[in-house]
Image (cartoon, rainbow, N blue to C red):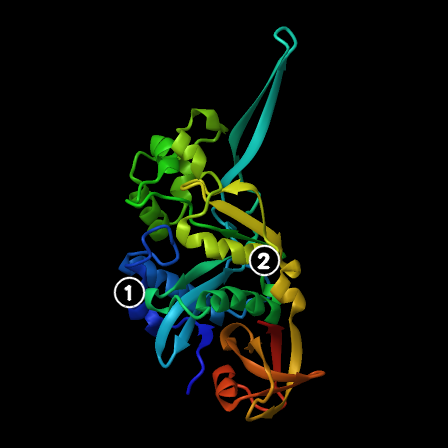
Amino acid sequence: MSVPFIRPVRREDYDQLRAFARVTGGGMTNLPDDDTALKERIGRAVDSFASGATKPGGEVYMTVLEEDGKILGTAGVFSAIGLKEGFINYKLIDEVHYSAEYARTTRRTVLMPSHDFTACAEVGMLFVSPDARRGGWGKLLARSRYLFIAQKPEIIADHICAELRGWRGPNGEQPFWESVGRHFFEMDFVDADLHNATHGNQFIQDLMPRHPVYTVFLSPEARACIGRPHESAKAAYDMLVEEGFEWDNYIDIFDGGPLVDAKTSQIRTIRESRVKKIFAIGEVENGDVFLMAAGAVASFRCVREKAQIDGDSLIISDATAKALNVKPGDFVRCVAW
């Protein structure tokens, strides 16, 4: 029986990823529901893996989870974001005013345009096929990104963030966009989201307000969306928090979803991972389940399987060795599942 494994995306994955893009429900700019844009995304990732980068330069490392030729999900890492066009979001800031004449203090929250995450790395592209959403595949995809970084940390920026899809109603309504974005972009949320996915975010820099926006002028429904992840993103948010990401009042300018961040080297999976040498390949007895990765960048592979560890030595099954493309004497990075 074969072992599901994570590997770099390939151009021939397009048809399966195109099917994913049709069911994301919007808000995933890295799986755009557009033929040309999706091919460009995949092509950029393939080129990034082949680039031989030695430092963060805007590369996009997209990976897929494969089982017997079928793709079950996607994940990815951006080495550094916004290097050319900037990366913009809102920072929630409280303004306090005091009037001695009236002996009154007021506090108002403003949305302050921010470029604080320009040149940071980003984890994203997390998507699990609707028919594979049991079995912990989302967690495998999410955590595999950190082992990808650990295998060659010098190509990823030392500060990292993640954007979560913001809340929307059962019929797709987006109160935050209706209160903020629509007034400046003069288009529907779906159109703005697709334009961002297909043409990049320069139009955001051109059209969004350059001054703070007071939240008191937003609708109550829009204020309730601020920093609130979409129902489908709650599990991803919880996993990010478990890894050490924190929310520091940054939100997406389109849907108000939270943006969390961490020091790359302090991510829990990276900190706790250890490199072991394969002692033997065969039957695994009395082992524990580990997240294991071998290879770096273009040769990266990652699995979640049972293994035996004795000191710095590792015993894995034949199926695991095949999935990781390793042999006795090779090194594997491991972390407890």
The answer to whether residue 208 of the structure is visible from this angle is: no
* Secondary element at image label 1: helix
Quadrant of the image occupied by residue 11: bottom left
- Counting from the top left corner in percent of width and height, residue 238 is at 52, 55
Picture layout, residue 97 above or below residue 322: above
Mark carried by residue 19: 1
Crowd class of label 1 (few under 14; some 14 to 19; many from 20; radius 10 Å): few
Residue at the image position 61 percent from the left and 18 percent from the top:
97
Q: Nearer the viewer, residue 214 or 194?
A: 214
Amino acid under disc 2: Glu
Q: Nearer the viewer, residue 3 or 231?
A: 231
Residue at the image position 42 percent from the left and 45 percent from the top:
166
* Residue 65 appears left or right of 250: left
Dot 2 or dot 1, earlier in sequence: 1
Check the image and name the residue furthest to the right.
311
Kindly report the distance in space between the C-alpha atoms of the residues bearing marks 2 and 1.
Answer: 31 Å
Residue at the image position 39 percent from the left and 78 percent from the top:
67
- Counting from the top left corner in percent of width and height, residue 145 is at 53, 65
Amino acid under disc 1: Ala
Mark carried by residue 320: none
Q: Quadrant of the C terminus?
A: bottom right
Picture layout, residue 73 above or below residue 102: below
Q: Nearer the viewer, residue 38 or 281?
A: 281
Which residue is disc 2 drawn over? 242
The answer to whether residue 105 of the structure is visible from this angle is: yes
Q: Quadrant of the N terminus?
A: bottom left
Residue at the image position 30 percent from the left and 45 percent from the top:
172
Label pair 2/1, CB-CB below 8 angstroms: no
